[in-house]
Amino acid sequence: MTLHPFRAVAIATGIICLTSNLLWAQFFTQVGTDPTWKHIIDNKLIPIGSNSTAGITGSQLTVNRELLEKGLYGNLPIDPNIKIHTVGTSKVDRNDFKKWSRWYQEDGNTQIFRLFKGEYNVRNNRAGAPRIEAFSDHKYSQGGWQEWVGRYTIIKAQDLNIFQIFGDGPGGNTGQMMLGLRSNGDVYFNPRRPKGHSDEVLVKNAEGKSFDIRIRHNGNEYEIYLNGELKIKHHVRSNNNHFRWGMYGHDNMPGEAMLMITGATVNPGNKPRNASIPAFENSARHSLNVRSLPGGIAELAFGLTSQKLVSAAIYNNNGALMARIPLGVKSAGAHKAYFSTSALTPGIHLLRFEYGGESATRFLSINQ
């Protein structure tokens, strides 16, 4: 099957065809097609007025990891403790992300967010409001500093919000500050609260560009860093906060939009990060998930496209090797393996999965 960069063109059959865009081609390849929004609505493929559990799948994207996993945060795996909010439901658990691949996918350390022409919110009666966002399970109020980091790559711009601190503050339970994206590619800071402060452009004409963002907030003040440099200091008093990132609009989508965020994680100082532990080295696409189970064990689920010798290693916050897990030679297909976590201290660890001379990483959370 031919691989193509993403470009959406609707045709009468209700399928989105793909044509080439040389700018986008450097960032990813794509297999398959996506149903048009009209086809989805006309054929009642998504519920109207309620949260959907079925989801809608789409084409498969493979990112250029060598190009995207750079900068200050590109070597960080995606935070494991997140959910997504789509046009069809307000909360999707990680185990069900694959059901919503038309709008959201992960490849390596990179999250892929897509919205298509004509889309709008259908889960309730709120008009417009197309959305594909990830949001953190971590909640916080006034007190110590909390932070979010990630490396943005803007593929196709529209007028959208691309980051929020969401919490209880002025204006109610809503976004207390935002980063916005304009259709001309400009990325800007929108303070929202308190009223009376102007937007400020952070990156001009960002389409086709990558940049690092760091947000710090203590429930009263916040800071915005661009490529490691402090750009904004502002204040908003709010409680029960969490971070949201992706794409969220106000009106029906005028055209397609796409961005990628690499290394998105909350409070990275509390997670393993060591330059000697690469986030991804593989060029082929392999599935990989790890999770803790009751009773001091963990489940490692992985899929291989061909027979390989596989093993795993676990590192702590300081990058020290804690355990090696030999798994032997595995055939092509889906596999599950189980191992003891009793020797691991509570917290976030890094699991490095090695297969046939290549490797991939995932976070493993140990709670006691």
Image (tube, rainbow, N blue to C red):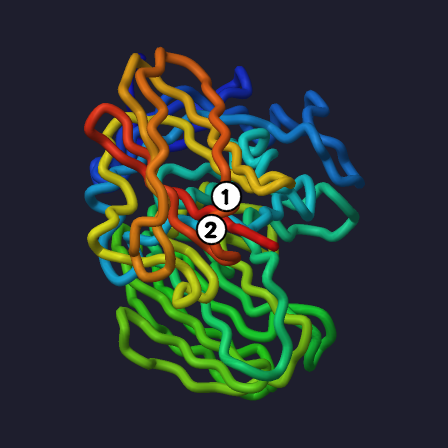
Quadrant containing the N terminus in the rendered view: top left
- Left or right for 56, reference 274: right
Quadrant containing the C terminus in the rendered view: bottom right
Quickly name the residue at label 1. 341
- Residue pictured at 21% horizontal, 39% vertical: 26
Can you see residue 184?
no
- Residue pictured at 47% horizontal, 35% vertical: 289
Cβ–Cβ under 8 Å for marks 1 and 2: yes
Quickly name the residue at label 2. 344
When asked about the image quadrant of residue 111, the answer is top left
Residue 20 at x, y = what percent?
27, 29
Residue 283 at x, y = what percent?
23, 30
Q: Nearer the viewer, residue 299 or 256?
A: 299
Q: Nearer the viewer, residue 51 or 322?
A: 322
Considering every residue shown, the one lying at the far front of the view is: 343
* Disc 1 to disc 2, C-alpha distance: 5 Å
Residue 348 at x, y = what percent?
46, 55
Secondary structure of the residue carrying numbered label 1: loop
- Left or right for 331, reference 163: left
Q: Residues within 10 Å of mark 2 (few under 14, many from 20)?
A: some
* Above/below status of 169 relative to 98: below
- Residue pictured at 62% horizontal, 48% vertical: 85
When asked about the image quadrant of residue 256, the answer is top left
Q: Nearer the viewer, residue 203 or 312?
A: 312
When asked about the image quadrant of residue 123, the answer is top right
**Could you tell me the amino acid type at mark 2?**
Leu
Secondary structure of the residue carrying numbered label 2: loop
* Above/below status of 153 relative to 339: below
